[in-house]
Amino acid sequence: MSIDTSSGMLRLSVLAGLDENGPIYLIKENELLLRAEDVWDMEYSGACLKIWRIIDGARTVFIDLALEPEIIIIRRMNSHFNGRLFRVRKLRAPRRRALDSVASRVAEYERLFERLAAEIDGRPAVYGLHNGVDIDAVVREGRKQIVKMHLERDLKDGLRREFNWDWAYSLWVLGRVLERSPVFGEASRERVNLPPAVLALHERVAEIKAKHRRHFEALEDVVAEYGGMIYLGNVALDSAR
């Protein structure tokens, strides 16, 4: 879908699908295009557009989106592109008992990391200072990051086996718990050494998320699926794994 405002007015185009003959439009530059064999229902309110498709008497959400001057937010979608299902859907929240179990496991791994990190920090210095840089401190930090990476991988694999969750779902559940972790959470990740262009991109993304907070909060549990891939946040996962 796209929005064109170059003429001074908003022109919305929405694809209903894509095949070898090219795009099939549901809406093209504000004109609603409906095929005779399909039955549709549509609601537009408060800069939000929701379209249902009636198939065999059942009403299914085709697309649910919010239109903002800068962005288009897809909240739900059920369509096909080149014969493959493309959908945007909200994940089912895990049971409270499972979430508590995950939190307990993460706390156990946090304690393990702190113990291993203390062992790394306690090793004697070997390289010393070079051009004002404490090489031993750099090496210790690198080793701790490697330990943390392995612990996160073990957490993911353990959750899949314990709860029989698929890869994408276990990663999503674990991510909900890890984001609050002082050891594995986003706040613990070092960014000061990132290139200026990457830091600027992070700042721009943060501005957009702050401006459209209510939409992004609603999208926290939403994934996109297409062609055997599941897109979770900014991570693409092979659903066959």
Image: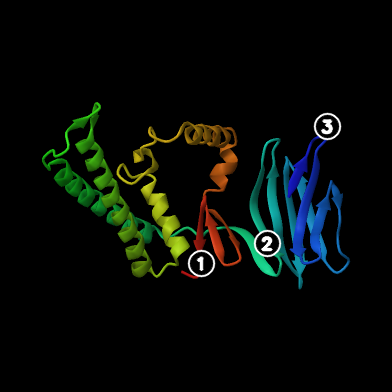
Who comes first in sequence, dot 2 or dot 1?
2
Mark 1 belongs to which amino acid?
Ser
Who comes first in sequence, dot 3 or dot 1?
3
Residue found at x 69% / y 52%:
64
Give the class, few, some or many, for how many residues have Cα within 10 Å of label 3's Cα (few <14, many ≥20): few
Q: Is residue 221 above or below residue 69?
A: below
In depth, the one of 47 and 123 nearer the eye is: 123
Give the class, few, some or many, for how many residues have Cα within 10 Å of label 2's Cα (few <14, many ≥20): many
Who comes first in sequence, dot 3 or dot 2?
3
Q: Mark 2–mark 1 contact, CB under 8 Å? A: no
Q: Is residue 132 above or below residue 212?
A: above
Q: Which residue is mark 2?
A: 78
Rounded to the nearest angstrom, the CA distance separating label 3 from label 2 is: 31 Å
In front: label 2 or label 1: 1
Residue found at x 65% / y 67%:
85
In depth, the one of 118 and 30 nearer the eye is: 118
Mark 2 belongs to which amino acid?
Asn
Rounded to the nearest angstrom, the CA distance separating label 2 from label 1 is: 18 Å
Q: Which residue is mark 3?
A: 8
Residue sticking out furthest to the bottom? 56
Q: Is residue 93 above or below residue 30?
A: below
Q: Position of residue 92 (x, y in %)?
A: 51, 60
Q: Is residue 62 above or below residue 66?
A: below
Q: Which mark is residue 239?
A: 1
Q: Is residue 102 left or right of residue 240?
A: left
Mark 3 belongs to which amino acid?
Gly
Residue sticking out furthest to the top? 132
